Amino acid sequence: MQLPDSSSEAIRLKPHDYTPSPQPLYQKILVALLLALTVVLGTGITTVPPAQASALGPGFHGGGPLFVGAFIAEADGSQVYCMDLAADPPLKFTSAPVTVNTLDRHPGGSVNPTDLAMLNYVLSRWGQSTDPEITAAVQMFTWSVADPETAASRGGDAYMLLAIPAQHHAAVLHNLGLMRATAATHHAVDPSMNASISMTTQYAGQLTLSATPDTLEADVSLTNAVFANGSRTQKLTPGTYPITGTPADGAPQYQISASASSPGTGLGAKINLYATPGQQRLLGGGANTPLSASASSPMIDLDFQPVITTQVASRFIQVGDTFADNLDVSVTAGTWTILNGNRIPLTAVGTLYGPFDEQPTENTAPPADAPVVGTEEVVLTGARTYASPGSLKASTSGFYTWVWEINKPDQGIYSKYLIESFADRFALVPETTVARFQPVAVSSVNQRLAVPGEATTDTLTVSSANGVWLKRDGQPIPVIFEGTAYQVPGTLPPQRAANVLAEATPIETVRVTATGPGTYVSPPVVLPSTGFVTWVWTMRIATQDPQVRDYIAADWADDYGIALESTSVRHTMNLTSEVREFNVHAGGRAFDTITVSGLQPDHGEFAGDGFWGADHDEITHTVYGPFLHESDLTDDLALDTAPVLTSITTPARNGVYRIGYTNAEKIVPTEPGYYVVVSSFLGDDRVLPFRSSPADILERFYVPGPTVPVTVITQATPTARVGEAVEDTALVQGTTIPTGAYLMFRAYGPVPDGEPASCEAQPFFVSTKIPVTQAGVYRSGTTTTNQAGNVYWVETLYHQDGSILTAGVCGAPGETTRITAPQVPVVVTKAVDTVTLGSPAHDVAIVTGPVPSGAHLAFEAYAQTGSRPVCDVSNRVFDTRQNPVPVPQAGEFRSPAVVFDTTGTFFWVETLLDEHGGVIHRGDCGADGETTRVTAAGLAQTGAPSILSLGFAALMLLTGGVAFTLWRRRKNTDHNTRRRTPPKHGRTDADANPYTTEHTIL
């Protein structure tokens, strides 16, 4: 038995500060001294023989006749101790030790087994110390146990201390007390040791060690198991200790065994006895009793528990991709069983559930109605990572989740090695794959036909093209669609194409956030210019919320030019006309000159495309009359029941048409009265309907009776925007117009809406004196105002001497112009009409109305290449889009000058853009006033003019006269032809009769 280390508190002895080493000379002196003391004191100690005596070991001999300490046995060199206190010192030859289990005392009796066991323990534990304070205590313990009567008769411990210097008494007595106490608890008369193993599970168990004495320490070794600290060997005292089995990897069964051993130092009722004839017997330790014990468990059948955790190879996939799952297989109990050198195969079955429109709720098992895509099997042959076969594909968008199982009954002969079946939870996020959805849209415009400045919207029907619309946190994933309205180049409807034409001009881009499948209406977009506009909708992943981008399959865009996504911003036909004579005698002929503008250059040629209707290529000019009273000719005249003299048709194309000049279309009134020519156009998908007013004084003539009184009928510009030109027109009729008569026009205001008409203040416009020599139409000349409100016109016809023939009334019907502030900017342009080759040309844009911050103007010029205006990239010769002209506020803006390098005709197009480049307004190709003609420089002439030259000059003079007349007429109506928004056709009650007979002169 291995005793506790001497450093423990229970057996800690006080060491001496030196260790004596016996020398031959010292021995001789000590022996002589002892003999002398014996003789003098008469103690009965005999003379020590001179040869082969045991040597003295560490101990004390001062202050008395005794030597208290160890002797060195010459037989084996061990330190031994005297047993018989009264006997002679053992200075003769000492025999070899003999282990005895009985020991007689002198003069009688024997040492009992318990005392013998304690002697064995103390001598074995401390007998070989080299410290005299320890060996002295061992000797005192030995005499007190082996020869107690003699020791007691001489005074016990006190007697023995006489041989020990006083300064060592305390240490020696301390050591002696510890030896006595320790020997009482650590000795064993019959030492023993036993071991046993019990198992609570296949791997957890206990080792129980029992021993006598119960302070025994044993070295214990385990086979196929470890102690709690992970070691297989440990020094233990009796008790129960947890152990964990460590079978070989893959073993189907195993057995745990334990072995314990102890040297049994100082254990047992026995001791080594050294005999010295005739002298004290000597006792020595080392009579040990080696102990051992072993134990084994029964054979333990092993099983194990495999588990599966998975991570899908890709969280997001596209529809059509295969599902891939990575299986991480581990063992939570036991080790994977090995048979015939191989780990047993197990079959794992994975069930893929889906599609779901959102992440399913995690649960221990799938819902009973959960849709199943299919199953896959993976054969498992150990703890490692596996990949699923990848035989299943995503047919639609959605969330798909795996559930993997190892069903014990399905494993056949290998099922006995499984602890239990395994199934992971349903709808674990790492086991869920998302097949992205594809948001798409179908749209149709809500305004198939529109006018410039009108706001249009688009209806968007949104869905997922490849399955369910996915959700997050219970809500459909929001998707942003962007719609851009493009101005289609040219005048014809757009042709459908996969990509937006490079020449198409973006007007504005709006966004619609779709919060799931359904129908949405876009924000309105103002259509600034005539022509076709088409929407293109896109859905780009980059513009989506970063948190939802992974759920969307791909970018999407619909086609350009889809008919249902297009709007025709219809052109406004401008028609000005004037009859040649305002008084026509009965049976005479009336003539009318009609100027048509504002139509597309190709109007009348478009035959339709199946969605957009063909052009209506006919304007009907109907002569209504006679009417008895001129006041019957009002704007709301019931034409359906009005008398008709004749009807004449002309093409609905830009140009000047003269009617009444041929016999086929002659206008011959036969009855006296008032007549008016009304021109009407039914309209089509590219041009708004048009009807001239029956109250138009320029289209009125009169067939008089014998005498016609002088009358003045006036008609002012009915409406205009701030900054636009306005005027008043007077029709003077009658046969008694005095010589030298003249007209003057005055304009008052503008007076705010809601306030009564007032002409008391100074007029802001006064015309010149306009001579009136015959019946006809007379114009005031144009003016403008920069304020909104009502402008009131008053015309006055004067005698030559300045007296008034007739005067208008302030606020008379037809004599009010309503000035409105534009809601959107209005752009009117006027390019340089003609330049010679090498001279600079430019365009001028007049911007009125509210101008958004950051607006700018771009000017482009296009060379004429055919018979009609075309403006596209191929014939563009000037472009300022990269360096536009800033437009900080309403006003007049001039383009940079350009010198054209060839003669010909050039078309200007102006574009007003917002700060982001969106189109606010874009001019028409070939619009009135937007053409510059470049001519060659004039040729120098010498000598007399030729006949050809004279003829040419005469022709030019004649043409100039005609042109001057037409120019005067056109100048008075140019503001109508340049207007970018259609005229107002309806009138309020106050405007019902725009013509007023101010006064009649008989």
Image: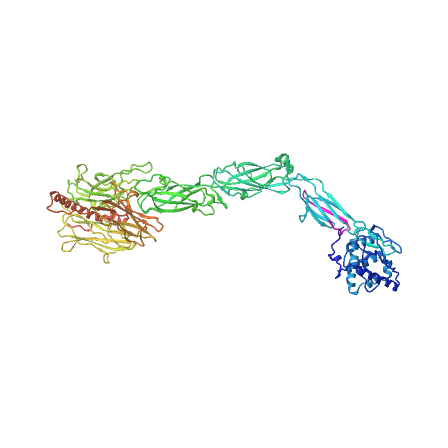
The residue closer to the viewer here, 93 or 256, is 93
- Is 788 above or below relative to 571? below
Image-based side of 234 in relation to 911, left or right: right
In this orientation, does residue 990 appear?
A: no
Residue stretch in magenta: 202-218
Q: Position of residue 152 (x, y in %)?
A: 86, 60
Residue 294, quarter of picture: top right
Q: Position of residue 229 (x, y in %)?
A: 67, 49
Residue 591, quarter of picture: top left
Asked which colour scheme the image uses, the reply is rainbow
The residue closer to the viewer here, 274 or 471, is 274
The residue closer to the viewer here, 994 or 681, is 681
Q: Position of residue 108 (x, y in %)?
A: 89, 55
Q: Is residue 671 magenta?
A: no
In this view, the residue farthest toward the left is 944
The residue closer to the viewer here, 616 or 716, is 616
Residue 58, quarter of picture: bottom right
Q: Position of residue 787 (x, y in %)?
A: 28, 55
